[in-house]
Amino acid sequence: MHIDIITCLPRLVESPFNDSIMKRAQKKGLVEVNIIDLRSYATDGHKSVDDYAYGGGAGMVMMIEPIDRCIQDLKSQREYDDIIYMSPDGELFTQSIANQLSLKKNLILLCGHYKGVDERVREHLVTREMSIGDYVLSGGELAAAVISDAVIRLIPGVLSDETSALSDSFQDNLIAPPVYTRPADYKGWKVPDVLLSGHEAKIEQWRLEKATERTQKRRPGMLEKH
């Protein structure tokens, strides 16, 4: 998989890809992540990527010209499955969408900033808009990192245990069940006996029951929907 992240603040998004699973995925050659400085596509000496909004109002707006120049340059190098704009009013990102995107080959993630982007970017240049929640961040960089992490970890070979991602919360429209590790008894707080029994069928049944119970308590809408 190839992911290009377009941002006017590259350093803000670099760190998540330099450690842990994201770093190992790149070293294995399973994913290539390029962080592209939008300012390199600016046309003036000040490397401007934002301007005042027509009609007035507070805040600056990211201009269409450098964004278009950047996207067209990238599209001349490869064909993209999706060009996704990070926006608080976009489609709500879910595990299901992460699963879908993990099957793609090439993605562009466009990070908004300031008061957002010129509306013509949304109308003509992107294919999807994505939100990680109903709140506003300073820019789309952190959202792009979140989406990239959720997607990349699903690529076969990224996780050392291939079944790990399949048992994550939301994969089966259920929240993951409780998990325990050693010691089996700590200050009188004991691990459930069934998990120590070695009986796989009973353990799986217990996990399903606990996952359903936890989902009903914390996210009842998930069960109602599915």
Image: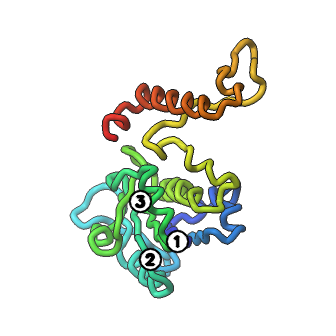
Q: Nearer the viewer, residue 36 or 23?
A: 23
Name which residue type carries label 3: Met
Residue 17's disc is: none
The residue labelled by disc 2 is 80
- Quick check: can you spot residue 44? no
Front disc: 1 or 2: 2
The residue labelled by disc 1 is 4
Q: Quadrant of the N terminus?
A: bottom right
First along the sequence among labels 1 and 3 = 1
- How far, Cα to Cα, is label 3 from label 2? 16 Å
Is 164 placed left or right of 39 in the picture? right
Quick one: SS at disc 1? strand
How packed is label 1: few (under 14 Cα within 10 Å), some, or many (20 or more)?
Answer: some
Q: Nearer the viewer, residue 78 or 157?
A: 157
Percent x, y of residue 206: 56, 28
Question: Vertical placement of 136 versus 148: above or below?
Answer: above
Front disc: 3 or 2: 2
Is 31 placed left or right of 76 in the picture? right
Q: Which residue does the image show at 43% across and 29% down from the upper left?
A: 218
Percent x, y of residue 61: 35, 64
- How far, Cα to Cα, is label 1 from label 3? 13 Å
Specify the color scheme. rainbow
Q: Which residue does the image show at 75% across and 18% down from the upper left?
A: 185
